[in-house]
Image (spheres, rainbow, N blue to C red):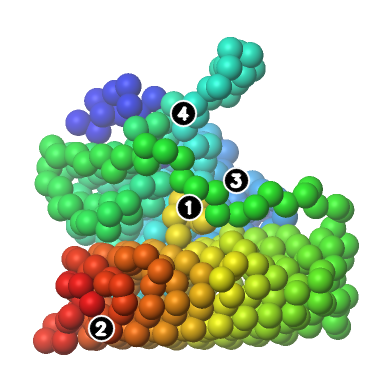
Amino acid sequence: MLSRTLAAPCALGLALAVAAVAAPAPAITHGSSGPGAGTARAPVMGRTALLERLSGRILVKPPAARGFMALHGRRTVPIGTVIDASHGTLRLLTALSLHRRTQAARIWGDSFRVLQNATGNGMTRLLLVGARPSCAVRSRARAASTRRRRVKSRGLWAEDDHGLYSTYGANSVASVRGTRWGTIESCAGTRTVVSRGRVAVRDLSNGRTVLLGAGASYLAPTPAAPLPATTEPIPPAPPAEPLNPRSTSCNGTYSGSGREVTVPAGALCRLLAGTVVSGNLHVERGGALVEQGVVIAGNLQADGAASIRIGGGGSIGGDLQMQGLTAGPDSLCDTIVKGNVQVQDDGPNAPLHIGDLGACAGGPGLTVGGNLEVQNSAADITVAGNAVRGNLQLHDNAARLTVTANRAGGSIQVHDNSVGLAGTLTGNTAGGDCELANDSPVITGSENTAGPGRHNTCNAGA
């Protein structure tokens, strides 16, 4: 069944297959000698994964690396590593808990990023990062120049034995329940196909979840019109300068390692992937920050900043605090924040996207170890696809709210917002109460769930 499906027209191009089996941790051995061998240790949930090259050529790019390196034998890599299995096969081992239980997967066919939270049940997320389908050609000349490099579809196929895996496409997320399934990206959208077992598919366009059985499929369509641009063009970055080991005033493009970084008033600071800030990062009034895949050990604070755009699989060891942003759009994507996220008093010209699909280019939102709170802001706010260990709170905002497909371990509270246009609260999951109250005009709530026996007022207008 699987081989016949792979040969179907919708699966032309790149494909990635996973054979996942829950298993005890195997004996750990050192990999072959060479730059890609490294040291192989048992995986730690939310921190590391163990890779083993089985055949062909496998390339890996850890979050702090500037480029790809070849994998030889076995190697332990950080969570967030990008793996290129286009020309080889590897085995991926991740931890299920802090008690040395693991699950294994055999993977080949495409590039993906492996993600996992440090808490919870050990769900391993496989995010496709290969070439996107080429869906539009505006002229004959452009068609001739791009014919050889067009990608009609790409996909991730998986087979597992009650492992904890989810696959992220551009328009849907598929969560496995012990099965064989495929996630195929094409111009039509993201199609999930099940050949054995069951898969829960969440459609990111409407927040609905569909449970598929063997032989069934579901297409989460690509929006009829392109998603609106959520970031303004940025001039090409000049060559990067190394960060000062002690402190840096950032006005330009930087990489490397530094202790404390400050973005002065009126400056534009670009931090490249792999940059490490061992202290805090502070953006002063009127400054702007653009960073992708940066590790910040302390806090990120922005007071009266012009614009903030973060993403690319980085992390913040403390809190993310933004107050009084004056311009935008601002986007917070694909970043692990171990503390709290607090946004308040943003101006009317600073629309905010936290995990929004358009702003994050189809990738995941934030993973927050504490609470996520947005208050007293005056521009449109989109909060979508984020995982929050504590509470998710939006209150006293004078803006249009779109809150979709978020998961909070605590309560979800949306109240006392004066939105310019009717807002939506759809497909969110709370471990505690879910509360929607005292908003004007009405915010419409649907398909939101609260914890067992907890209060839920989120599925009505308020």
Residue bearing mark 3: 59
Q: Earlier in the sequence, mark 2 or mark 4?
A: 4
Q: Quadrant of residue 408?
A: bottom left
Q: Nearer the viewer, mark 2 or mark 3?
A: 2
State the residue at coordinates (21%, 56%).
209
Measuring from the top left, give residue 379's x and y in whole percent: 51, 70
Q: Give me the C-alpha separation between circle 1 and circle 3.
A: 28 Å
User: For the residue marked with disc 4, what is the amino acid?
Assistant: Cys
Which amino acid lies under the numbered mark 1 shown in the image of this protein? Gly
Q: Nearer the viewer, residue 280 or 263?
A: 263
Residue 309 visible within the image: yes
Point 58% across, 17% down: residue: 139
Q: Is residue 389 above or below residue 200?
A: below
* Residue 414 point in image, percent of width and height: 32, 80
Sooner in the amino-acid sequence: mark 3 or mark 4? 3
Whether 142 is drawn above or below 421: the answer is above
Q: Amino acid at mark 3?
A: Leu
Asked if 290 appears above or below 211 in the picture, the reply is below
